[in-house]
Image (cartoon, helix red, strand yellow):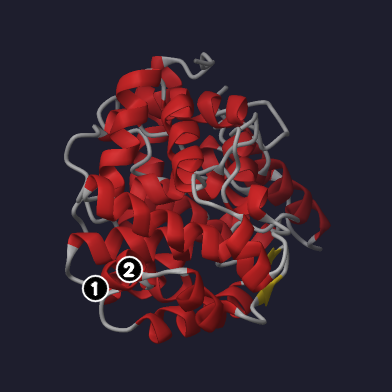
């Protein structure tokens, strides 16, 4: 596990600012912009975990492109995605997925996911049971997720390829072996299943503690994490996700990813864009803990005729390393 350079003093300086972002986030409204909207359509735990994994698996690229794809599949799967998956065979997969394409993935890739979930439901009763097998035998989160994706992919491929053609982006959808990437969508799925229940997350996997979770690291979280001193790394790898999570664990050992939804949507909403905007930085609740914002504000202040850079200097002085 990576270590963190976040000192207790820096953590206490950062904590109220993160809490301000958390409390100011209208989580219920933001769900409409998040793939978690799809499992929120269901009440049964098995339907939630099946629809959630399908949604998380395809949640890459632009939301306005993947959302219609997920929506169309779930509607065709009927009122119970779990029952549909458990009863699915190759012929049913062909009827559902023939001609399906979304960026890296084709129908065969998604069929593997659905048929794999169906087999696990029939044999183990839940997707949680497959993950727990990995957690018990491999003893690490990375190992457990590797076991999880490998188990989902354990279906006969010849008949499926004959019906739908060759797979194309299966390693993107269900990486096996897991590798060194951040596995953002898989860790996002785990957050949904393990944390909560609250407005966003479901908390239906009761035997996995939230303390074991890893931050679902994406470009938004990576950028904000660097600004806040949670990591100095620029890559979106498992090691970076561990480093960010270790820093957040100083703030909340029992629930280190509790700020994930709020911070991710803070970036997604444009409040903290890739190219800093002085106006946004000036009103950001994270400003006094940020390594970038104070200088952006100071520079903008100097450029305004008839003003001084005093405000910018004062903001710069509040930075905590």
Q: Are marks 2 and 1 in contact (CB under 8 Å)?
A: yes
Residue 83 sits in which quadrant? bottom left
**Residue 91 placement, left or right of 250:** right
Q: Secondary structure at mark 2?
A: helix
Residue for point 64% across, 53% down: 170
Dot 1, crowdedness within 10 Å: few (<14), some or many (≥20)? some
User: Residue 161, how many percent across, how many down?
Assistant: 66, 63
Q: CA distance from mark 2 to mark 1?
A: 6 Å
User: Residue 246, how many percent across, how many down?
Assistant: 45, 23
**Residue 156 placement, left or right of 307:** left
- 79 over 310 or under it: above or below: below
Residue for point 44% across, 40% down: 151
Q: Secondary structure at mark 1?
A: loop
Q: Which residue is mark 2?
A: 39
Q: Which residue is mark 1?
A: 42
User: Residue 206, how many percent across, how many down?
Assistant: 17, 41
Residue for point 28% across, 54% down: 121
Count every numbered label the image shows and give the total: 2
Front one among 80 and 231: 80
User: Residue 315, how many percent across, how many down?
Assistant: 59, 40
**Residue 243 placement, left or right of 180:** left
- 72 over 90 or under it: above or below: below
């Amino acid at each position: 596990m990576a270590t963190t350079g976040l000192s207790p003093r820096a953590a206490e300086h950062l904590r109220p600012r993160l809490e301000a972002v958390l409390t100011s986030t209208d989580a219920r409204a933001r769900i409409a912009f998040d793939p978690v909207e799809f499992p929120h359509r269901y009440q049964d735990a098995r339907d939630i975990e099946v629809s959630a994994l399908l949604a998380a698996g395809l949640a890459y690229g632009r939301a306005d492109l993947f959302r219609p794809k997920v929506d169309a599949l779930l509607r065709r799967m009927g009122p119970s995605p779990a029952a549909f998956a458990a009863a699915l065979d190759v012929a049913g997969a062909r009827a559902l997925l023939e001609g399906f394409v979304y960026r890296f993935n084709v129908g065969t890739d998604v069929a593997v996911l659905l048929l794999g979930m169906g087999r696990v439901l029939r044999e183990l009763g839940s997707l949680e049971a497959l993950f727990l097998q990995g957690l018990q035998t491999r003893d690490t989160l990375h190992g457990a997720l590797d076991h999880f994706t490998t188990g989902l992919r354990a279906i006969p491929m010849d008949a499926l390829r004959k019906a739908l053609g060759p797979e194309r982006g299966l390693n993107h959808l269900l990486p096996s072996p897991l590798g060194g990437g951040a596995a953002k969508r898989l860790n996002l799925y785990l957050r949904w299943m393990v944390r909560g229940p609250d407005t966003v997350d479901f908390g239906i996997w009761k035997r996995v503690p939230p303390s074991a979770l890893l931050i679902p690291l994406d470009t938004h979280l990576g950028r904000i994490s660097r600004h806040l001193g949670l990591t100095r790394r620029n890559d979106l790898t498992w090691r970076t996700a561990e480093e960010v999570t270790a820093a957040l664990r100083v703030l909340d050992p029992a629930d280190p990813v509790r700020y994930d939804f709020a911070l991710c949507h803070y970036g997604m909403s444009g409040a903290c864009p890739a190219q800093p905007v002085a106006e946004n930085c000036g009103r950001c609740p994270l400003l006094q803990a940020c390594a970038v914002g104070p200088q952006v504000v100071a520079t903008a202040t100097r450029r305004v005729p008839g003003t001084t850079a005093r405000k910018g200097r004062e903001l710069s002085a509040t930075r905590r390393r």
